[in-house]
Amino acid sequence: MKKFWEMKQSVNKKEADIYITGEITRYKSDDEDTTATSFQKDLKLLGEVDRINLHVNSPGGAVFEGIAIGNMLKRHKAHVVAYVDALAASIASVIVVSCDEVVMPENSMLMIHNPMQGIYGNAKELRKSADDLDKIAGSSVIAYLSKAGEKLNEETIKQIMDDETWLSAQEAYDYGLCDVVEEANQMVASVSNKIFESYQHVPKDLIQEKKKTDCYEITDERKQLAEEGRKNLKKINQQLEELKQ
């Protein structure tokens, strides 16, 4: 199974870049190599770096894998700067706020909500699952509050999570979840439609941007070019038939 992250060391060997793109999954190549162990191995291979640039564009995914990655980056002795290239949603936002510094282009977003899971079982099992989800949510609350400091209190972050809140870069900055807001970039979120369907309050602008990246607009000019291409192909086929004769 392909890893959802990539790590590269810079030329001066004092900096490294980590890219987390797409869904955060339960990576497992064998019985001992899980997301946490594999990520930790790759992190160690970077060597003694002073700065890590973490680039994130992710809709979230597996909660415990995200928590493990966030804790590893938080404990790392290097200064870790998270760049939200387009979207850091769900557990990806927890990874981002676990870093020493967060940088967001003004058209990027954080999405914060309560953890979810598919649940099947009897009443007792369902109540236990609900209690487990509350405990998992508590870990996220701690991460957000630790980053925000005095700009955010527990009551507010819990309400933000209850509401499945999509925060702009400026809103994230106002809540203390972002340190620097940069000029807008060309936002191309690599998020599948299936992932969007699992969320309830996806901003229309983000869906429209996704649609633009999924297909080309069929214009009159494109139709004309296609028609000319068909005519040229027909002429070539006719010429080939004449040569055969």
Image (tube, rainbow, N blue to C red):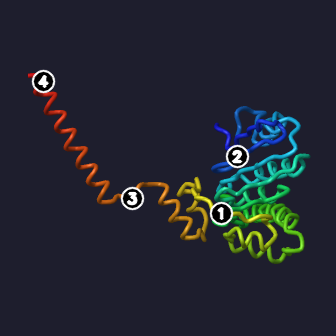
Q: Residues within 10 Å of mark 1 (few under 14, many from 20)?
A: many
The disc placed on residue 217 is: 3
Q: Earlier in the sequence, mark 1 or mark 3?
A: 1
Find residue 103 and report its horizontal and vertical position in percent: 75, 60
Q: Earlier in the sequence, mark 2 or mark 3?
A: 2
Residue of label 4: 243
Q: Tell me the distance, in whole angstroms, between the alpha carbons under discs 2 and 1.
A: 16 Å
Three-letter amino acid code at disc 3?
A: Glu
Q: Tell me the distance, in whole angstroms, between the alpha carbons under discs 4 and 2.
A: 55 Å
Look at the numbered disc 4 and give the secondary structure of its residue: helix
Mark 4–mark 1 contact, CB under 8 Å? no
Mark 4–mark 2 contact, CB under 8 Å? no
Q: Residues within 10 Å of mark 2 (few under 14, many from 20)?
A: some
Question: Please, is residue 165 above or below residue 126 in the view?
Answer: below
Find residue 120 and report its horizontal and vertical position in percent: 66, 58
Residue of label 2: 19
For the residue pair 171 and 158, the one nearer the viewer reads as 171
Look at the numbered disc 3 and give the secondary structure of its residue: loop
Residue of label 1: 108
Q: Tell me the distance, in whole angstroms, between the alpha carbons under discs 4 and 3.
A: 39 Å
Three-letter amino acid code at disc 4?
A: Leu
Find residue 92 and report its horizontal and vertical position in percent: 72, 56
